[in-house]
Image (spheres, rainbow, N blue to C red):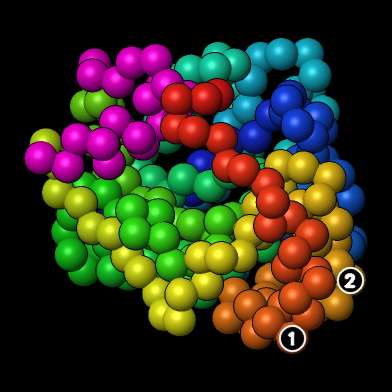
């Protein structure tokens, strides 16, 4: 079985433009995500999928600098971007990453893929019943399923790539993976300046290498004032781009 990681990335962000190329420690945010994905040890290939907008020329340049292939496609139809990547190389399984999750834990990625492969399912996610902090989720889907939903997905499902699959559980074989203890009260994704302040504090303490999520959670448990920095941020609804 061949595994392909795809990181969706773009410079445009309504709340924090250019966030994926901000420097965090010794790397850009995008580089941190790519590094952690590779560190999982379960990927045969890794590609960044960005848009055809001129602003995203900077992402293509960063991909060249960090040695990751870059594919460019539609702005809002991210599913078509992913399918465009699959047209350029063969893969059985796809791990979906987003470039605004710089604290991605390679151990979680590896564990999730091992469960997916052993179970032989269509799709696995850690977010059906959330026990991980937002920003640490892992998704794995069979490439054949992505191709199948191209004929079915519409509107926001094309933006969120896999949402048609997990909102139609009767049509696909799904697993929702959980972890203990429950760390879902933490927000470790990058979407606002307050998110940045928290993530920057974490990286300043732990350094440039990927860190286990449990280690971060334990550290923040002793520093509630840091965890409160972005606790008020509301996540966008599924229907929002």
Q: Earlier in the sequence, mark 2 or mark 1?
A: 2
Q: Is residue 187 left or right of residue 67?
A: left
Magenta portion: prevailing SS class = loop
Extent of the magenta region: 150-170
Which residue does the numbered mark 2 point to in the structure image? 204
Q: Is residue 230 magenta?
A: no
- Mark 1 crowdedness (10 Å alpha carbons): few <14, some 14-19, many ≥20: few
- Mark 2 crowdedness (10 Å alpha carbons): few <14, some 14-19, many ≥20: few
What is the count of numbered marks?
2
Residue 40 shows in the view: no
Residue at (42, 21) in percent of width and height: 156
Q: Residue 217 lies in what quarter of the image?
A: bottom right
Q: Is residue 156 left or right of residue 173?
A: right
Label disc, if present, on residue 222 of the rendered structure: 1
Question: As displayed, is residue 229 above or below residue 47?
Answer: below
Please tell me which residue lies in front, 204 or 35.
204
Q: Secondary structure at mark 1?
A: loop
In space, the residues marked 2 and 1 are separated at their CA atoms by 16 Å
Residue at (35, 35) in percent of width and height: 163
Residue at (53, 47) in percent of width and height: 97
Q: Quadrant of the C terminus?
A: top right
Q: Give the percent coordinates (x, y) of residue 50.
A: 63, 27
Residue 119 shows in the view: yes
């Amino acid at each position: 079985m061949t595994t392909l990681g795809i990181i969706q990335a773009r410079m445009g962000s309504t709340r924090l433009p250019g966030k994926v190329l901000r420097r965090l420690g010794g790397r850009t945010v995008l580089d941190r995500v790519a590094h952690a994905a590779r560190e999982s040890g379960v990927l045969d290939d890794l590609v960044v999928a960005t848009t055809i907008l001129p602003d995203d020329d900077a992402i293509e340049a960063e991909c060249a600098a960090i040695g990751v292939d870059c594919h460019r496609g539609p702005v809002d139809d991210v599913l078509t971007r992913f399918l465009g990547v699959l047209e350029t190389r063969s893969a059985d399984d796809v791990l979906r990453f987003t470039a605004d999750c710089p604290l991605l834990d390679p151990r979680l990625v590896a564990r999730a893929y091992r469960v997916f492969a052993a179970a032989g399912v269509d799709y696995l996610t850690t977010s059906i019943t959330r026990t991980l902090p937002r920003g640490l989720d892992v998704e794995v889907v069979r490439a054949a399923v992505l191709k199948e939903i191209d004929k079915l997905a519409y509107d926001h499902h094309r933006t969120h790539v896999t949402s048609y699959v997990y909102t139609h559980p009767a049509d696909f074989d799904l697993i929702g993976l959980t972890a203990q203890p429950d760390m879902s009260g933490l927000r470790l994704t990058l979407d606002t300046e307050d998110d940045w302040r928290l993530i920057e504090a974490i990286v300043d303490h732990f350094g440039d290498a990927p860190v286990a999520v449990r280690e971060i959670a334990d550290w923040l448990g002793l520093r509630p004032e840091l965890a409160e920095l972005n606790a008020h941020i509301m996540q966008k609804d599924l229907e929002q781009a």
